[in-house]
Image (spheres, rainbow, N blue to C red):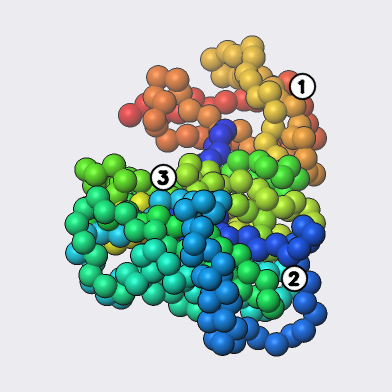
């Protein structure tokens, strides 16, 4: 049963998945090279060596951008996942990754294909900070990003969603940016950074990309028009909540969005009530073809009692034009 919501609620790029956008020279968003060869390990090593010799004598003054503070828990053994760096090369298939051989690179490994960063050594005491520089390479173009990794307390509790399923409604003519619903998860960790919660849309995803989620608020919004292509009556999505601790912990919930082809009646009100009749007034819905209306009512003295329903004929369109005879409900 779908509940009507007057306000809605939305992941950002990634809470810990940092997006590193790669741009070619002259500001072009695509790579200049036209070849289709894949980047090889040899290219990565040669490129890293070139950057190493270029920066090793002036590393402290180089204007790297620190994307975010990443965390790893105290005592983490080798092989623990720490972070994932994503780089995008529009129009190309291959982006390869590595760590520059400077600073604290010996404590970490980076997968050349996925961008996953993991521990290479056991991590030391809480409060220590490690600095590494990630390199993304595609067809001779490179981008570098500096990351700070802080050693923190062990993350104990996962975030937990308030509901297993979240349900919302949208009209097929809803405008882009319309709020659908809001998800919320709570984390019981006492350490503030371990209790941080971030959200992202997960499987099943909408293949047409019609929805987006704010990673910090959990508010789901309409990202693309529903009128652009036929829509199924109910869109099903998944959502994952991930905390800010290490090791990262998560929870999963489902989202169901009902796509309506008719909007609700407007300005609904009652007038001229007697012991047996009442005028029900409304303005027809803004969108959709109306075939009829159903009036649901219950006694004021029993607001939580079982409601009664009255079917109104199709010519009752608006403006209090038809008095409705209401049958009194039996009292318990």
Label 1 sits on residue: 319
Q: Which residue is mark 2?
A: 31
When asked about the image quadrant of residue 27, the answer is: bottom right
Counting other residues with Cα less than 10 Å from the Cα at mark 1, is it few (<14), some (14-19), or many (20 or more)? some
138 or 326: which is nearer to us?
A: 138
The answer to whether one can see residue 164 in this image is no
| Separation (CA) of disc 2 from disc 1 | 62 Å
Above or below for 272 versus 42: above
Q: Residue at x 75, y 51 (%)?
A: 225
Q: Quadrant of residue 240?
A: bottom left
Q: Nearer the viewer, residue 260 or 36?
A: 36
Q: Secondary structure at mark 1?
A: loop
Q: For the residue labelled by badge 2, is the local secondary structure a helix, a strand or a loop?
A: loop
Q: Nearer the viewer, mark 2 or mark 3?
A: 2
Residue at position x 47%, y 53% from top? 60
Q: CA distance from mark 2 to mark 3?
A: 40 Å
Q: Nearer the viewer, residue 148 or 158?
A: 148
How many other residues sit within 10 Å of disc 3, few (<14), some (14-19) or many (≥20)? many
Residue 201, compared with residue 7, is above or below; it is below
Quarter of the C terminus within the rendering: top left
Residue closest to the eye, 134 or 57: 57
Residue matched to label 3: 184
The reply to whether residue 332 is in sight is yes
In the rendered image, the residue lying farthest to the front is 57
Residue 79 at what x, y percent from top left? 30, 75
Residue 159 is labelled as: none
């Amino acid at each position: 049963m779908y509940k009507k919501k007057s306000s809605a609620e939305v992941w950002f790029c990634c809470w810990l998945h940092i997006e590193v956008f790669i741009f070619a020279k002259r500001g072009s968003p695509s790579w200049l090279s036209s070849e289709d060869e894949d980047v090889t390990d040899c290219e990565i090593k040669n490129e890293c060596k070139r950057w190493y010799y270029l920066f090793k004598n002036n590393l402290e003054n180089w204007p790297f951008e620190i994307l975010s503070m990443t965390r790893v828990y105290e005592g983490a053994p080798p092989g623990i996942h720490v972070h994932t760096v994503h780089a995008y090369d529009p129009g190309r298939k291959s982006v390869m990754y590595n760590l520059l051989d400077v600073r604290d690179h010996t404590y970490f490994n980076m997968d050349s294909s996925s961008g996953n960063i993991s521990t290479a050594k056991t991590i030391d005491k809480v409060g220590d900070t490690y600095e590494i520089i990630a390199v993304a390479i595609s067809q001779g173009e490179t981008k570098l990003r500096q990351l700070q990794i802080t050693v923190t307390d062990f993350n104990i509790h996962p975030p937990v969603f308030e509901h297993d399923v979240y349900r919302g409604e949208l009209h097929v003519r809803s405008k882009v940016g319309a709020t659908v619903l809001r998800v919320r998860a709570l984390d019981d960790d006492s350490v503030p950074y371990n209790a941080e919660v971030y959200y992202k849309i997960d499987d099943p995803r909408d293949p047409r990309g019609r929805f987006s989620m704010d990673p910090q608020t959990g508010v789901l919004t309409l990202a693309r028009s529903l009128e652009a292509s036929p829509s199924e009556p109910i869109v099903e999505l998944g959502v994952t909540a991930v905390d800010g601790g290490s090791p990262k912990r998560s929870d999963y919930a489902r989202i169901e969005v009902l796509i309506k082809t008719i909007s609700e009646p407007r300005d609904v009100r009652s007038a001229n009530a007697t012991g047996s009749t009442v005028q029900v007034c409304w303005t027809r819905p803004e969108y959709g073809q109306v075939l009829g209306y159903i009036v649901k009512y219950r006694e004021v003295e029993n607001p939580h009692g079982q409601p009664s329903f009255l079917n109104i004929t199709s010519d009752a369109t608006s403006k209090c034009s038809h008095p409705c005879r209401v049958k009194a409900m039996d009292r318990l």
